[in-house]
Amino acid sequence: MGGADLALLVVVLCALASVVVLFQTVSTQDRRSEENMAKDLLENLPVPVFVLDDDFRIIRYNGLFESLVGKAPLERFLYEVFRDHKVIDALQTCKKEGTASTPFYLTPSAEKRSYYMILKRTNGEIIGTIEECSHGSTKEDVELYQKMLHELKTPLSSVRLMLELLEEEEDPVQRKDLTTRIIDEMDRLNQLTSDLALLIKMDRGLVERMDKVNIVNLLSEVIWQMSVLADNKRVSIEAEIPSHSIFVEGSKSLLKSLFLNLLDNALKYSPERTKITVTLQEQEENVLITVADEGEGIPEEQREKVFQDFYRATSKADGLGLGLGIALEVVKFHDGRLWLEPNEPHGLKVNVALRKA
């Protein structure tokens, strides 16, 4: 399997490990919202995921895992589902050492399909996820994996610390504040998982068919969606968009992810009481979309680096640093162009040129 695939599995396990600890720490009164959040996270993950009790019995799983094994696996032992001795060995190792991983075959048939399993033990439960083996890891894959592990330390450490404080805190107001902050950190992990899933989806050619997309309607929808977050930060979003329909050839879901990403990135770097301006200009063959903020901007010598995975131009903004890297990949997928320039007197302009349909 590739390093990006392996990195995704690690992210999934780290996020789920935090959720399991959260289940076991919060009081019954606090637990309902966290359970709903965790169920959504589990079901929306882009890989098969399962949770075992200490006897290796399956107690939770998502739809992708059920599709993989072909039948409802609840309360079955994992070694009954996957009859490969390597799985049994990995389970025993995980129970002793806390983590384990192994390649294995899904069935003992003549046409064996090779998979890779990663396991992590947390508070008496074992979390696992699976990915079909693919090409070997490149040097770039390994570097991505190493950077990701480094970036995960901050939110995971924060979650662990806040869970410990939550366990000791008796004041309801403080408990609510800690729970909110834990959810925020979990959202950061969830966003990283979603971004990686999107990259892998494009790399494997699993994107839905291209179609005519009304870019005016799509931009208006994204601006409306981000306005609530902007209002909370006291940042305004101004739109300079034509009233008539303009169409581009592309994937609606990918293009929506692109513009959500650009606006989210602009919002992270926008001080209070500033504005973000979104413009759409129709040209002869292209449409030009510009997202301009009034933040600190990015020095010219750093502009190319911001497209690297996990790069931050400053340390003042939260987030795991995949934003503009994801945006660039989506634009390239659509045979478009993306470039940066200063927003005078201060700030940054992100420009995207897409071909008209």
Image (cartoon, rainbow, N blue to C red):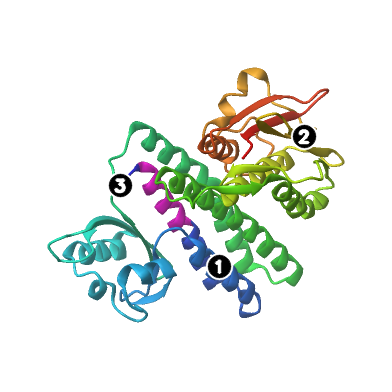
What residue is drawn where x is 77% and y is 32%?
295
Residue 10, magenta (yes or no) = yes
Magenta segment range?
A: 3-14
* Lower position in the chain sequence, tag 3 or tag 1: 3
Image mark for residue 1: 3
- Residue 298 place in picture, x, y as percent: 69, 25
Query: Could you tell whether 7 is left or right of 347 in the image?
Result: left
What is the three-letter code of the residue carrying label 1? Answer: Asp
Image mark for residue 40: 1
What residue is drawn where x is 33% and y is 43%?
2
For label 2, the residue is 293
What residue is drawn where x is 73% and y is 53%?
221
Q: Quadrant of the C terminus?
A: top right
Residue 12, magenta (yes or no) = yes
In this rendering, is residue 282 above or below 267? Answer: above
Tell me if mark 3 has few (under 14), some (14-19) or many (20+) residues whose alpha carbon lies within 10 angstroms of its own. Answer: some
Q: Which one is in front, 172 or 72? A: 72
